[in-house]
Each structure stands twice: as C-alpha cells, then as structure tokens.
Image: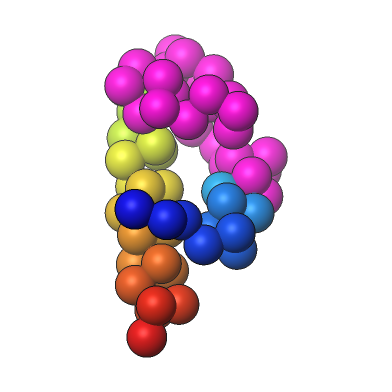
Amino acid sequence: MDIDPLTVELRRFILTYAEHDPDCPGIDANAWEEQRRVCICGLAQRLDELLGKVDERLAQ
C-alpha cells in the first residue's frame, strides 16, 4: 500500500507536538512500526486511524 507523502508529513508534524502518557515509550517518527507495537497509551493507534482516514480522503 502506497502512503501519500502528505500523510507522512502529517505524521511527523503530529508526532512532534502530540502529548501522550509519560509512561508510554517515547514516540519516534522514524521508527513507526516499532512505535505502533509498543505504544501503551493509544496515541499511535489513534494517529494511525486518523491518517488512514486522511489517506482515504486523498484517494478520492
């Protein structure tokens, strides 16, 4: 599945400013697959859902 470059940039922007549970492992925009696996506060999952919706809209 190709990811739109805009989605990649949105992810970087959101990860730069997003707040998440301080007990959650730090979010690293350059290791996204690992972060999705270890995120315990739900931020990575919510971000993936948001970006999936953006991808769908851009594909229309």
Q: Is residue 15 left or right of residue 2?
A: right
* Residue 17 counted in the magenta span: yes
From where the camera sits, is residue 50 visible? no
Q: Position of residue 31 (x, y in %)?
A: 53, 24
Count of numbered tags: 0
Residue at image location 54% in from the left, 19% down from the top: 26
Q: Position of residue 45 (x, y in %)?
A: 31, 40
Q: Is residue 56 above or below residue 2?
A: below
Give the residues in magenta. Answer: 12-38
Viewer-nearest residue: 1 or 32 = 1
Q: Is residue 37 left or right of residue 2?
A: left
Q: Is residue 6 above or below residue 43?
A: below
Viewer-nearest residue: 7 or 19 = 7
Q: Position of residue 51 (x, y in %)?
A: 42, 58
Q: Is residue 60 above or below residue 8?
A: below
Residue at image location 35% in from the left, 59% down from the top: 52
The quadrant the C terminus occupies is bottom left
